[in-house]
Image (cartoon, rainbow, N blue to C red):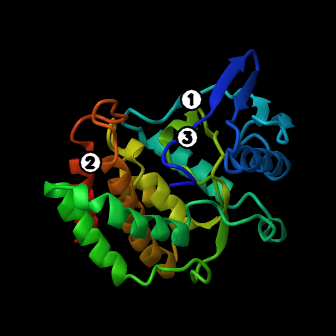
Amino acid sequence: MGSGSWGRHAVESTGGRVVKRFPHGDGGRAAREWRALTLLARHAPGLAPEPLQAGLAASEPVVVMSRLDGKPLRGAALSGEQIDALAEAVAAVHAALPSHVLDGVPLRPGHQAELVGHLRAWAGTARPAAEGPVRQGMDAGLAWLAASGLEADGAWGVPPVFGPGDGNLANYLWDGRRVRIVDFEESGRSDRAFELAEITEHVGSWVDGPLDVPAFLDRFDLSPVEAARLRECRRLVALGWLFLLAADDPDHPVNPPGTAERQAGRVLDLLA
């Protein structure tokens, strides 16, 4: 859940290079992408594309990077080996930056307080039009949110990490041996619980090839505080997805029919 509902950029792949062109007024996406690529190239080489060139001051910013081979993990059941490699890549990106570097990285878009703010705004616009299971999921989620104590970013009681900010499994490429990561438009300082929730609750982790969430999360040694926070973050992110999916244009849907209703069931299950 980042600075916009859906990503908006053009991608060109030529030879060993990938060119990403961002629209005018991209909300800082190109700058975040470039910052992440340069930091990861320095502190975790090989985990992400190599930064080659950037035109961040252009009216339509451009970021050029190396091309990574591999098959996106979205859309198919993952083997145990693939889940291992996914967890290793996620853990590696979280721990990539030294603390003194991470301290200088801004909080990623769409983190706790920003997402809560979106939900409160959407409650007044999208909720009145919702019906059936979607309305039931929204009402239950908003009631939980009001009592959750998640109103503000700040002292989460857990260590900060570097977060890619986008849990779409299409951004995790399996080359038969390891997983590497692309797409850092929404990246920034975050925490493990929130970033893991981004992956487990992303619509791409269940709508067209479900991720084995318990098996994936078992690969992480979370502290009791992180485990408790993960439960709350999963609820928060899932509720955000319910509002986004409910707003899908029925004439030009991004996801299969009934996805919002299925998401409502997921929200209710997480709340239970």
In this picture, is 129 found above or below 13? below
Image quadrant where one finds the C terminus: bottom left
Quick check: marks 1 and 3 in contact, CB under 8 Å?
A: no
Q: Which tag is nearer the camera, tag 1 or tag 3? A: 3
Residue at image mark 3? 7
- In space, the residues marked 2 and 1 are separated at their CA atoms by 34 Å
Residue neighbourhood size for the residue with mark 2, other residues' Cα within 10 Å, grouped as few (<14), some (14–19), many (≥20): many
- In space, the residues marked 3 and 2 are separated at their CA atoms by 19 Å
**Which residue does the image show at 36% across and 59% down from the upper left?**
238
Q: Which tag is nearer the camera, tag 2 or tag 1? A: 2
Position in image of residue 72 (x %, y %): 52, 32
**Which residue does the image show at 75% across and 15% down from the upper left?**
15
Between 238 and 242, the residue placed more toward the observer is: 242
Position in image of residue 59 (x %, y %): 79, 36
Residue at image mark 1? 176
Between 189 and 32, the residue placed more toward the observer is: 32
In this picture, is 3 found above or below 103? above
Between 146 and 35, the residue placed more toward the observer is: 146
In this picture, is 218 found above or below 164? below
- In space, the residues marked 1 and 3 are separated at their CA atoms by 27 Å
Q: Amino acid at mark 1?
A: Gly
